[in-house]
């Protein structure tokens, strides 16, 4: 599950590539002095995916990738990185749109109106919706009513939407 504290820093001597999506100022705790930092816009797009693929194609074994940004963007880029051959142990994520409650162990959204990716378990369409876990949405693919579940797929970078049974 996403976390909002700085990820473990790669061991000394490892090449670190930090991809920041959105405000670099907000991401300063996750950047490194000895690594390469690339700044992107806050939104993930096909063009962003192609830029990331192009950059990762020229990397080498031992790269440590740090992704900083919103949950949807970080996990979409993580999926792209894995499709380029990186393994999960080489990737650290820093999700900036989550907050940890100091009194409880649960994660709360910093902005409940943030759009999240939802994967329909019925027709397998991935859509974007302003919804939190437990909210009901209508699938754009099969037009069924879905409830957004806690299950988050890092592969699809989306929460599972399952059929609401009345």
Image (tube, helix red, strand yellow):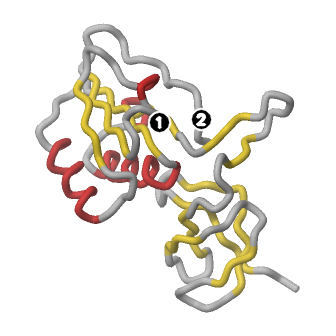
Image position of 161 with respect to 110: above or below: below
Image quarter of the C terminus: bottom right
Image position of 133 with respect to 18: above or below: below
Give the quadrant of residue 56: top left
Label 2 CA crowd tier, 10 Å (few <14, some 14–19, many 20+): some
Q: Residue at x 15, y 44 (%)?
A: 57
Tell me where residue 124 appears, x and y as whole percent. Answer: 52, 77
In contact (CB < 8 Å): disc 1 and disc 2: yes
From the viewer's perspective, tell me whether residue 144 is left or right of residue 87.
right
Image quarter of the N terminus: top right
Q: CA distance from mark 1 to mark 2?
A: 7 Å
Tell me where residue 84 appears, x and y as whole percent. Answer: 25, 48
Q: Secondary structure at mark 2?
A: loop
Q: Residue at x 41, y 32 (%)?
A: 25
Label 1 CA crowd tier, 10 Å (few <14, some 14–19, many 20+): many
User: Which label is found at residue 156?
Assistant: none
Q: Which residue is mark 1?
A: 93
Q: Which residue is mark 2?
A: 3
From the viewer's perspective, tell me whether residue 38 is left or right of residue 114.
left
In the rendered image, the residue lying farthest to the bottom is 143
């Amino acid at each position: 599950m996403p976390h909002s504290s700085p990820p473990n820093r790669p061991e000394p001597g490892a090449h670190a590539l930090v991809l920041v999506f959105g405000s670099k100022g907000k991401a300063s705790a996750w950047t490194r002095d000895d690594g390469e930092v690339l700044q992107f816009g806050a939104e993930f797009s096909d063009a962003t995916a192609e830029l990331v693929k192009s950059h990762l194609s020229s990397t080498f074994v031992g790269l440590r990738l740090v992704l900083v940004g919103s949950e949807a963007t970080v996990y979409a880029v993580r999926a792209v990185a894995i499709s380029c051959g990186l393994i999960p142990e080489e990737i650290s994520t820093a999700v900036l749109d989550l907050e940890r409650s100091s009194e409880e162990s649960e994660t709360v959204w910093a902005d409940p109106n943030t759009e999240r990716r939802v994967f329909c378990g019925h027709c397998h369409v991935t859509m974007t919706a302003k919804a939190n876990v437990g909210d009901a949405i209508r699938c754009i693919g099969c037009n069924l009513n879905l409830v957004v579940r806690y299950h988050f797929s890092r592969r699809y970078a989306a929460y599972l939407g399952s059929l609401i049974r009345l």
